[in-house]
């Protein structure tokens, strides 16, 4: 007894960047390998970036990453003058695709096994194909499905699906020699798959865990995220589209939020419009169609789905192939301009200049279906506002968060009833003492023993 310990290398009093090490005798297991939002922003901004050619040198020197032996790849270590050692870790378990849970895989020794949901692997492959700035490198990926336990160096880790703003999201139950540890990943109960989160909570409660490591994104004195359910996002978007007779409906949402894509497809059907998706979204949906467990709009066969051709001079191979494959559904800005009253178009931030060619009628609705900007002097937000003002669009804010409210987190803690609670992925770990009996606030890089 008393051999298991938990060390948080990220997600400490901050939202995102989860990197949690669970050690139990021979087992050394990572839960997520994320980057914080704004990772390294004390030293780097815009074009001032860490020197890629020197691998981990800048990150180590500036104290941005821990110098852990047996974790990083030889290519990353050599230019940092840090000796390579063979892996000292049993594996990494990825809860879901979001970058604050995956991005530091790019530094990882490729021989360390990376366990992730089968759907997450598909999303990752699509993302690495379509996004130029995204490359996590090669890894020993080992896809799992919900309920399929993975044994690593004496510890069984059981993934249990949860609902979140990305498909194929999981929490984990780790069966250690000091008892079970439950880890939530990111989760919500107001999405279209609330039953998955219920499954996780029930499984965690049944395991009678000694420890619950939980996210607390919305555990805060003031919840800055005006929250709707996915169904409310749909209702309000339908009402908005109904009022927009003869005008185009523009929607922007997170690129990997497949539930939101489905919501807008349903909105479009309801108001008898066609949806025009950006090629990256179409690529993701086509890739996910291979996974029968995830309910995916059928880009190939659904006559209501069209795909936008940005008319690149030299499109990337994937984009050229995709547009060729979907030839009969490909439309250009001119088509969209001429059929404004019949279309709901997806427009990402980086595709805002398409407005110049689409020429939306003044007063057209722009549905911002992402979190509300939290920081006052957010440059992206200021830029977006200028585009909206210039084209005289009407902005609407309809979003369902990927996270449970403070109240729901409190109820979950009560139901799971762990001996201790370790809050991560929250700016307010101290608030957990209001509703959880024994809270251990993590300190970065300081091991927490499970039993005394
Ligand atoms: Zn997260």
Image (spheres, rainbow, N blue to C red):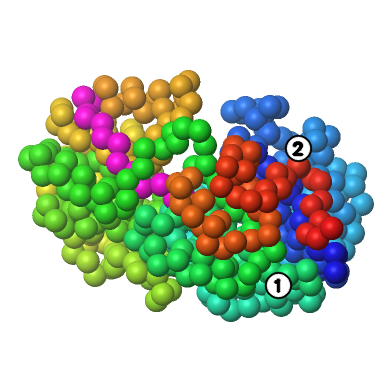
Quadrant of the image containing the N terminus? bottom right
Residue behind mark 1: 175
CA neighbours of label 1 inside 10 A, class few (<14), some (14 to 19), many (20+): some
What secondary structure characterizes most of the magenta part? loop
Left or right placement of residue 432 versus residue 377 in this view:
right
Q: Nearer the viewer, residue 184 or 268?
A: 184
Determine whether, in the image, residue 344 is placed left or right of residue 117. Answer: left
Whether residue 306 is visible: no
Give x and y (percent) for residue 357: 24, 34
Residue 117 against residue 34 in the figure, above or below: below
Secondary structure of residue under mark 1: strand
Which is more toward the observer, 119 or 311?
119
- CB of residue at label 2: within 8 Å of ligand 1? no
**Measured from the top left, where is residue 12 in percent x and y?**
68, 42
Give the foreground label among 2 and 1.
Answer: 1
Q: Is residue 401 magenta?
A: yes
Q: Is residue 173 left or right of residue 70?
A: left
Does the stretch in magenta take in 184?
A: no
Question: Which of the 4 image quarters holds residue 93?
Answer: bottom right
Q: Residue at x 38, y 64 (%)?
A: 193
In this figure, what is the number of numbered marks? 2
**Label for residue 64?**
2
Q: Residues within 10 Å of mark 2 (few under 14, many from 20)?
A: some
Mark closest to the chain's N terminus, 2 or 1:
2
Real-space CA distance between mark 2 and mark 1, rounded to the nearest whole angstrom: 31 Å
Residue 142 coordinates in the image, percent (x, y): 63, 72
Residue located at (46% from left, 52% from top): 408
The answer to the question of whether label 2 and label 1 lie on touching residues, with beta carbons closer than 8 A, is no
Residue at point 62%, 27% (across, down): 45
Residues drawn in magenta:
391-403
The reply to whether residue 291 is visible in this rendering is: yes
Task: Give the quarter of the image for residue 333.
Answer: top left
């Amino acid at each position: 007894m008393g051999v298991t310990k938990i060390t948080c290398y990220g997600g400490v009093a901050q939202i995102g960047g989860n990197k949690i090490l669970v050690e139990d005798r021979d087992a050394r297991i990572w839960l997520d390998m994320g980057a914080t939002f704004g990772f390294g922003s004390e030293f780097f901004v815009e074009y001032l970036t860490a020197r890629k050619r020197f691998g981990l040198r800048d990150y180590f020197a500036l104290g941005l990453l821990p110098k852990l032996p047996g974790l990083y790849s030889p290519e990353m270590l050599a230019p940092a003058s840090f000796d390579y050692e063979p892996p000292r870790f049993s594996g990494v378990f990825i809860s879901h695709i979001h970058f604050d849970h995956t991005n530091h895989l790019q530094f990882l020794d490729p021989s360390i096994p990376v366990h992730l949901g089968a759907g997450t692997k598909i999303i990752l492959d699509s993302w690495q194909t379509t996004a130029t700035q995204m490359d996590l490198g090669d890894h020993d990926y080992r896809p799992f499905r919900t309920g399929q336990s993975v044994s690593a160096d004496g510890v069984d880790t059981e993934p249990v699906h949860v609902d979140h703003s990305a498909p194929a999201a999981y929490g984990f139950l780790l069966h250690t020699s000091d008892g079970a540890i439950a880890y939530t990943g990111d989760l919500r109960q107001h999405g279209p798959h609330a039953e998955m989160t219920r499954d996780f909570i029930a499984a965690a409660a049944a395991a009678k865990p000694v420890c619950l490591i939980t996210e607390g994104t919305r555990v805060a004195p003031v919840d800055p995220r005006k929250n709707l359910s996915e169904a409310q996002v749909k209702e309000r978007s339908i009402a908005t589209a109904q009022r927009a007779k003869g005008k185009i409906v523009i929607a922007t949402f997170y690129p990997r939020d497949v539930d939101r894509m489905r919501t807008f497809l349903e909105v479009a059907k309801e108001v008898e419009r066609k949806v025009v998706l950006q090629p990256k979204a179409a690529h993701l949906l086509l890739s996910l169609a291979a996974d029968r467990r995830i309910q995916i709009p059928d880009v190939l066969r659904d006559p209501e789905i069209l795909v936008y051709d940005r008319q690149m001079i030299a499109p990337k191979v994937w984009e050229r192939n995709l547009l060729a494959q979907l030839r009969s559904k490909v439309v250009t800005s001119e088509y969209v301009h001429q059929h404004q009253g019949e279309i709901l178009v997806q427009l990402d931030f980086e595709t805002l200049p398409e407005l110049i060619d689409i020429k939306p009628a003044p007063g057209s609705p722009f549905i911002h279906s992402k979190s509300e900007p939290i920081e006052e002097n957010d440059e992206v937000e200021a830029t977006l506002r200028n585009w909206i003002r210039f084209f005289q669009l009407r902005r609407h804010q309809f979003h369902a968060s990927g996270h449970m409210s403070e109240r729901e987190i409190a109820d979950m803690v009560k139901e799971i009833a762990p001996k201790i609670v370790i809050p991560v992925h929250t700016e307010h770990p101290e608030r957990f003492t209001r509703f959880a009996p024994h809270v251990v606030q993590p300190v970065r890089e300081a091991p927490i023993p499970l039993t005394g």
